[in-house]
Protein backbone atom coordinates (compact mmCIF):
# COMPACT_ATOMS: atom_id res chain seq x y z
CA UNK A 1 0.00 0.00 0.00
CA UNK A 2 1.33 3.43 -0.96
CA UNK A 3 1.63 5.85 1.96
CA UNK A 4 0.35 9.33 1.19
CA UNK A 5 2.90 12.14 1.20
CA UNK A 6 1.97 15.01 3.48
CA UNK A 7 2.75 18.38 1.92
CA UNK A 8 5.76 20.18 3.35
CA UNK A 9 3.66 23.28 4.06
CA UNK A 10 1.18 21.22 6.11
CA UNK A 11 4.02 19.66 8.07
CA UNK A 12 5.51 23.09 8.74
CA UNK A 13 2.15 24.49 9.77
CA UNK A 14 1.41 21.61 12.14
CA UNK A 15 4.86 21.75 13.69
CA UNK A 16 4.89 25.51 14.24
CA UNK A 17 1.25 26.32 15.05
CA UNK A 18 1.91 26.52 18.84
CA UNK A 19 4.93 28.78 18.19
CA UNK A 20 2.82 31.11 16.04
CA UNK A 21 0.17 31.23 18.75
CA UNK A 22 2.76 31.99 21.41
CA UNK A 23 4.35 34.73 19.28
CA UNK A 24 0.99 36.41 18.72
CA UNK A 25 0.69 36.81 22.49
CA UNK A 26 3.97 38.71 22.62
CA UNK A 27 3.27 42.17 24.17
CA UNK A 28 4.67 44.03 21.13
CA UNK A 29 2.33 42.25 18.73
CA UNK A 30 -0.64 42.59 21.07
CA UNK A 31 0.10 46.34 21.31
CA UNK A 32 0.48 46.59 17.54
CA UNK A 33 -3.07 45.34 17.08
CA UNK A 34 -4.53 47.46 19.89
CA UNK A 35 -5.85 51.00 19.61
CA UNK A 36 -3.29 52.21 22.14
CA UNK A 37 -0.11 51.78 20.14
CA UNK A 38 1.41 55.26 19.95
CA UNK A 39 3.73 56.49 17.21
CA UNK A 40 6.99 56.25 19.25
CA UNK A 41 6.35 52.56 19.98
CA UNK A 42 5.40 51.88 16.36
CA UNK A 43 8.60 53.58 15.19
CA UNK A 44 10.59 51.61 17.76
CA UNK A 45 9.06 48.37 16.46
CA UNK A 46 10.02 49.28 12.88
CA UNK A 47 13.61 49.72 14.07
CA UNK A 48 13.60 46.28 15.72
CA UNK A 49 12.06 44.65 12.65
CA UNK A 50 14.56 46.37 10.37
CA UNK A 51 17.49 44.99 12.34
CA UNK A 52 15.92 41.53 12.48
CA UNK A 53 15.09 41.33 8.77
CA UNK A 54 18.42 42.87 7.81
CA UNK A 55 20.33 40.12 9.62
CA UNK A 56 18.06 37.31 8.40
CA UNK A 57 18.23 38.54 4.82
CA UNK A 58 22.03 38.83 4.88
CA UNK A 59 22.07 35.13 5.87
CA UNK A 60 19.60 34.32 3.06
CA UNK A 61 21.64 36.22 0.45
CA UNK A 62 24.79 34.52 1.64
CA UNK A 63 23.23 31.06 1.17
CA UNK A 64 21.69 31.87 -2.22
CA UNK A 65 24.95 33.38 -3.51
CA UNK A 66 26.74 30.11 -2.72
CA UNK A 67 23.95 27.78 -3.83
CA UNK A 68 21.43 29.29 -6.25
CA UNK A 69 17.85 28.07 -5.81
CA UNK A 70 15.00 27.46 -8.24
CA UNK A 71 12.90 30.30 -6.80
CA UNK A 72 13.18 34.04 -7.29
CA UNK A 73 13.43 35.40 -3.77
CA UNK A 74 14.72 38.82 -4.91
CA UNK A 75 11.31 40.60 -4.95
CA UNK A 76 10.52 39.24 -1.48
CA UNK A 77 13.24 40.92 0.57
CA UNK A 78 11.62 43.09 3.25
CA UNK A 79 14.50 45.12 4.70
CA UNK A 80 14.14 47.69 1.84
CA UNK A 81 10.48 48.23 2.80
CA UNK A 82 11.46 48.74 6.43
CA UNK A 83 14.14 51.16 5.32
CA UNK A 84 11.48 53.15 3.43
CA UNK A 85 9.40 53.34 6.62
CA UNK A 86 12.38 54.41 8.75
CA UNK A 87 13.23 57.09 6.18
CA UNK A 88 9.64 58.31 6.17
CA UNK A 89 9.68 58.64 9.97
CA UNK A 90 13.21 60.18 10.01
CA UNK A 91 14.69 57.34 12.03
CA UNK A 92 18.32 56.35 11.74
CA UNK A 93 18.51 52.66 10.72
CA UNK A 94 20.62 50.50 13.03
CA UNK A 95 21.07 47.17 11.22
CA UNK A 96 22.68 45.43 14.17
CA UNK A 97 20.74 46.92 17.08
CA UNK A 98 18.91 43.65 17.72
CA UNK A 99 21.06 40.98 19.30
CA UNK A 100 19.52 37.68 18.19
CA UNK A 101 20.56 34.13 17.63
CA UNK A 102 19.92 33.63 13.92
CA UNK A 103 18.65 30.29 12.60
CA UNK A 104 21.54 28.43 11.00
CA UNK A 105 21.00 28.37 7.26
CA UNK A 106 23.24 25.50 6.28
CA UNK A 107 20.99 23.49 3.96
CA UNK A 108 18.18 24.02 1.46
CA UNK A 109 15.76 22.59 4.01
CA UNK A 110 16.83 25.17 6.60
CA UNK A 111 16.46 27.96 4.04
CA UNK A 112 12.92 26.82 3.19
CA UNK A 113 12.01 26.68 6.89
CA UNK A 114 13.12 30.29 7.33
CA UNK A 115 11.32 31.34 4.13
CA UNK A 116 8.14 29.68 5.41
CA UNK A 117 8.17 31.82 8.57
CA UNK A 118 9.00 35.04 6.70
CA UNK A 119 6.44 34.50 3.94
CA UNK A 120 3.80 33.41 6.46
CA UNK A 121 4.37 36.56 8.49
CA UNK A 122 3.22 38.62 5.50
CA UNK A 123 -0.23 36.98 5.84
CA UNK A 124 -0.56 38.41 9.36
CA UNK A 125 1.09 41.57 8.06
CA UNK A 126 -1.83 42.38 5.78
CA UNK A 127 -4.23 42.28 8.76
CA UNK A 128 -1.86 44.57 10.64
CA UNK A 129 -1.65 46.97 7.66
CA UNK A 130 -5.44 47.19 7.60
CA UNK A 131 -5.53 47.88 11.34
CA UNK A 132 -2.79 50.54 11.11
CA UNK A 133 -4.72 52.29 8.35
CA UNK A 134 -8.07 52.17 10.13
CA UNK A 135 -6.68 53.20 13.52
CA UNK A 136 -3.87 55.61 12.66
CA UNK A 137 -4.25 56.36 8.94
CA UNK A 138 -0.81 54.95 8.04
CA UNK A 139 -0.50 53.77 4.43
CA UNK A 140 2.21 52.19 2.29
CA UNK A 141 3.60 55.61 1.39
CA UNK A 142 3.07 57.14 4.83
CA UNK A 143 5.10 54.91 7.11
CA UNK A 144 3.59 51.46 6.66
CA UNK A 145 5.33 50.05 3.58
CA UNK A 146 6.57 46.97 5.41
CA UNK A 147 3.21 45.84 6.79
CA UNK A 148 1.53 46.63 3.45
CA UNK A 149 3.93 44.04 2.02
CA UNK A 150 2.63 42.42 -1.15
CA UNK A 151 -0.70 44.26 -0.93
CA UNK A 152 -3.30 42.70 -3.21
CA UNK A 153 -0.80 40.09 -4.31
CA UNK A 154 -0.46 38.61 -0.82
CA UNK A 155 -2.56 35.53 -1.64
CA UNK A 156 -0.97 34.84 -5.03
CA UNK A 157 2.54 35.28 -3.62
CA UNK A 158 1.68 32.87 -0.81
CA UNK A 159 0.26 30.33 -3.27
CA UNK A 160 3.32 30.44 -5.52
CA UNK A 161 5.57 30.10 -2.50
CA UNK A 162 3.79 27.07 -1.10
CA UNK A 163 3.71 25.40 -4.55
CA UNK A 164 7.48 25.81 -4.60
CA UNK A 165 8.11 24.32 -1.16
CA UNK A 166 5.58 21.53 -1.64
CA UNK A 167 7.77 20.31 -4.49
CA UNK A 168 10.11 19.04 -1.77
CA UNK A 169 7.46 17.17 0.25
CA UNK A 170 8.93 13.77 -0.58
CA UNK A 171 12.32 14.53 1.00
CA UNK A 172 12.34 13.47 4.68
CA UNK A 173 15.75 14.90 5.57
CA UNK A 174 14.91 18.23 4.02
CA UNK A 175 11.60 18.23 5.90
CA UNK A 176 13.36 17.73 9.24
CA UNK A 177 15.80 20.55 8.47
CA UNK A 178 12.95 22.85 7.39
CA UNK A 179 10.92 22.22 10.55
CA UNK A 180 13.95 22.77 12.74
CA UNK A 181 14.85 26.06 11.02
CA UNK A 182 11.23 27.26 11.10
CA UNK A 183 11.15 26.67 14.88
CA UNK A 184 14.48 28.53 15.24
CA UNK A 185 13.08 31.38 13.14
CA UNK A 186 10.01 31.77 15.34
CA UNK A 187 12.34 31.73 18.37
CA UNK A 188 14.42 34.46 16.73
CA UNK A 189 11.36 36.75 16.35
CA UNK A 190 10.39 36.05 19.95
CA UNK A 191 13.88 36.83 21.16
CA UNK A 192 14.13 40.08 19.19
CA UNK A 193 10.86 41.34 20.63
CA UNK A 194 11.41 40.05 24.17
CA UNK A 195 14.86 41.70 24.31
CA UNK A 196 13.53 45.11 23.30
CA UNK A 197 12.10 47.20 26.10
CA UNK A 198 9.03 49.08 24.85
CA UNK A 199 9.12 52.86 25.40
CA UNK A 200 6.58 53.93 28.05
CA UNK A 201 3.15 54.87 26.68
CA UNK A 202 2.42 58.62 26.83
CA UNK A 203 0.21 59.71 29.76
CA UNK A 204 -3.26 60.84 28.65
C1 LIG B 1 0.05 40.01 15.48
C2 LIG B 1 0.72 39.50 14.49
C3 LIG B 1 0.21 38.38 13.61
C4 LIG B 1 -1.06 38.04 13.26
C5 LIG B 1 -2.34 38.72 13.68
C6 LIG B 1 -0.98 36.89 12.41
C7 LIG B 1 -2.04 36.28 11.81
C8 LIG B 1 -1.97 35.28 10.89
C9 LIG B 1 -3.08 34.76 10.15
C10 LIG B 1 -4.51 35.24 10.26
C11 LIG B 1 -2.61 33.77 9.36
C12 LIG B 1 -3.42 32.88 8.43
C13 LIG B 1 -3.62 33.57 7.13
C14 LIG B 1 -4.40 32.71 6.18
O1 LIG B 1 -4.06 31.55 5.94
O2 LIG B 1 -5.38 33.25 5.64
C15 LIG B 1 -1.20 33.68 9.60
C16 LIG B 1 -0.40 32.78 8.98
C17 LIG B 1 0.94 32.67 9.28
N1 LIG B 1 1.67 33.48 10.09
FE1 LIG B 1 0.99 34.95 11.24
N2 LIG B 1 0.32 36.53 12.27
C18 LIG B 1 1.07 37.44 12.96
C19 LIG B 1 2.41 37.48 13.08
C20 LIG B 1 3.23 36.56 12.54
C21 LIG B 1 4.65 36.58 12.65
C22 LIG B 1 5.47 37.69 13.34
C23 LIG B 1 5.10 35.45 12.04
C24 LIG B 1 6.48 34.96 11.84
C25 LIG B 1 7.52 35.39 12.49
C26 LIG B 1 3.95 34.74 11.51
C27 LIG B 1 4.01 33.56 10.81
C28 LIG B 1 2.94 33.00 10.13
C29 LIG B 1 3.03 31.81 9.32
C30 LIG B 1 4.27 30.97 9.07
C31 LIG B 1 1.77 31.61 8.76
C32 LIG B 1 1.37 30.51 7.77
C33 LIG B 1 0.62 29.39 8.46
C34 LIG B 1 0.12 28.39 7.41
O3 LIG B 1 0.93 27.59 6.92
O4 LIG B 1 -1.06 28.47 7.08
N3 LIG B 1 2.84 35.44 11.83
N4 LIG B 1 -0.84 34.59 10.53
Image: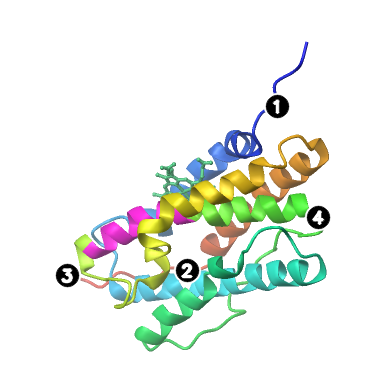
- Residue annotated with mark 4: 107
Quarter of the rendering occupied by the N terminus: top right
Magenta stretch mostly in which secondary structure? helix
CA–CA distance in space, label 4 to label 1: 22 Å
- Residue annotated with mark 3: 204
Region rendered in magenta:
122-133
Quarter of the rendering occupied by the C terminus: bottom left
Please state the horizontal and vertical placement of residue 151, each as a whole percent of the image: 37, 61
Marks 4 and 3: CB-CB under 8 Å?
no
CA–CA distance in space, label 3 to label 1: 56 Å
Say above or below: 150 vs 168: below
Of callouts 4 and 3, the N-terminal one: 4
- Mark 4 vs mark 1, foreground winner is 1
68 or 98: which is nearer to us?
Answer: 68
Q: Secondary structure at mark 1?
A: loop
Kindly tell me whether residue 86 is visible in this rendering.
Answer: yes
Q: Residues within 10 Å of mark 3 (few under 14, many from 20)?
A: few
- Residue annotated with mark 1: 5
- Mark 2 vs mark 4, foreground winner is 4
- Mark 2 vs mark 1, foreground winner is 1
- Mark 4 vs mark 3, foreground winner is 4
CA–CA distance in space, label 2 to label 4: 34 Å
Of callouts 2 and 1, the N-terminal one: 1
User: Measuring 69% from the left and 42% from the top, which residue is drawn there?
Assistant: 167
Please state the horizontal and vertical placement of residue 110, each as a whole percent of the image: 74, 52
- Within the image, what quadrant is residue 46 found in? bottom left
Q: Secondary structure at mark 3?
A: loop
- Residue annotated with mark 2: 197
Amino acid sequence: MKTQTIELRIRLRNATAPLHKQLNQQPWLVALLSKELALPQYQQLLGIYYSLYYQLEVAIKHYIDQQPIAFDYQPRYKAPLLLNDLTYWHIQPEPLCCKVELPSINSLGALLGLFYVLEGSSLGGSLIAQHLYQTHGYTRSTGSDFFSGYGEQTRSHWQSFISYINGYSDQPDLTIQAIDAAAQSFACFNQALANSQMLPFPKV
